[in-house]
Image: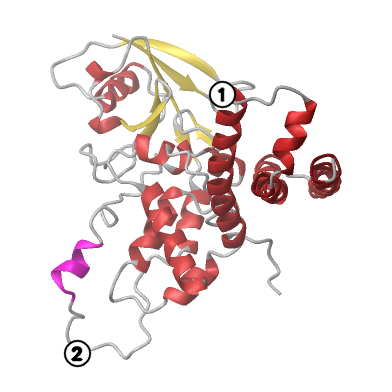
Amino acid sequence: MSRQASGLMAWVVQRATSVYLAIFLTYLLVHFVFNAPAGHAALVNWVAHPVVALSLLLFVPVLLAHAWVGIRDVLIDYVHNLGLRLGLLTLVAFTFIASGLWGIKAIITAGLWG
Amino acid sequence: MKISVYRYNPETDRQPRMQTYQVKTFQGMMLRDALLEVKKQDESFSFRHSCGEGVCGSDGVNANGRNVLACITPVTELKEPVQVRPFPGRPVIRDLVVDMTRFYEQYRAVKPYLVRKDPLPEQEILQSPQERDRLDGLYECILCGCCSTACPSFWWNPEKFHGPAALLQSWRFLADSRDQATEERLDALDGPYKLFRCHSIMNCVEVCPKGLNPTRAIGRIKELMLEKGL
């Protein structure tokens, strides 16, 4: 294993995820501006649609992977104290994993099973 | 014209200060001429310069917030009062003279020379006109340092990030058909620092007095890495 944190792979992940994010976020924006669900039932109905549910489930890890590379870049750039940087990276990682799991649970329980 | 220059002697001054001088202009006057005029008025003022025609790359300064070569910057292009400061992010030795050691270390680190594994031929190694064309926009760099010292990534990590000037030269040798160390060069650029601190901010492209494009060169290196790595 390389002794270094990834350079090329992180960059590729950031670029690839940005393509999905650009397309899906545009869809979300257009959908919620022009065809916003009228109430909770309509929202659940929308989430329960298999294509939407799958896109949302994919959106969670893609967004978090993209954000991870970005936050890691910011911390590498600006936080030079190794202990502080490691601490912040760990904190961000745990927060991301927790929010990711929570997001996926919400899509499944409130949307698909709702 | 009014010209305000950065004055600092770390040995005697506690703080840097800006000092204003009145300089007589003439037609075709460059910023370097104005600095020489200041030097005439106050010989304690220091700045680097040599060829006076944008070839040696010695007189890079920050004029009105932008890195320029003083010798090819007409004073008429600068809004008064002209503020001349040293390159940002580098330790000041005195007035406009900065310590460029890190910059040269990063340049050295990319092995800016042809590496051949085959025995050298008796005569020159030939290139096709197309192969030679790939070096255009790369070999012209005069290492003035305007780009790297305008790069925020280089400000934050000058000891680890190669910076635009060195990376432009890295691509200059990766793109050279006569070079035989592509794999080694790419391996050496691995990791999050040397190459990948570049976030395509493009200050380098904005300030290069030779009109070169380090961001594009860095993009080419990443493409080549992808090609070899995936």
* Magenta-tinted stretch: B127-134
Judge depth for marks 1 and 2 and give the one in front: 1
Q: Main secondary structure of the magenta part?
A: helix
Question: Is residue B93 shown above or below A40?
Answer: below
x, y percent for residue B153? 55, 42
SS for tag 1?
helix
Determine if residue B10 is in view: no
In front of the other: B105 or B116: B116
Compared with B47, B24 (above or below) is above
Residue type at mark 2?
Answer: Glu
Same subunit, labels 1 and 2: the answer reads no
Quarter assignment of residue B15: top right
Give the image quarter of residue B119. Answer: bottom left
Q: Position of residue A83 (x, y in %)?
A: 84, 48
Q: CA distance from mark 1 to mark 2?
A: 73 Å
Residue visible at 46% across and 30% down in the picture: B86
Which chain does the residue under circle 2 lie in? B
Question: Circle 1 sits on which residue?
Answer: A34
Q: Which residue is mark 2?
A: B122
Which residue lies at the image location 86% right of the left edge and 46% below the top edge? A98
Residue at 30% in and 49% down: B142
Callout 1: residue from which chain? Answer: A
Question: Residue B127: horizontal and vertical position, in percent?
Answer: 18, 75
In the displayed structure, does residue B117 sit left or right of residue A110?
Answer: left
* Amino acid residing under circle 1: Phe
Q: Residue at x 64, y 22 (%)?
A: B14
Q: Image check: B94 left or right of B25?
A: right
Kindly state the secondary structure of the residue where label 2 is placed. Answer: loop
Q: Quadrant of the N terminus of chain B?
A: top left
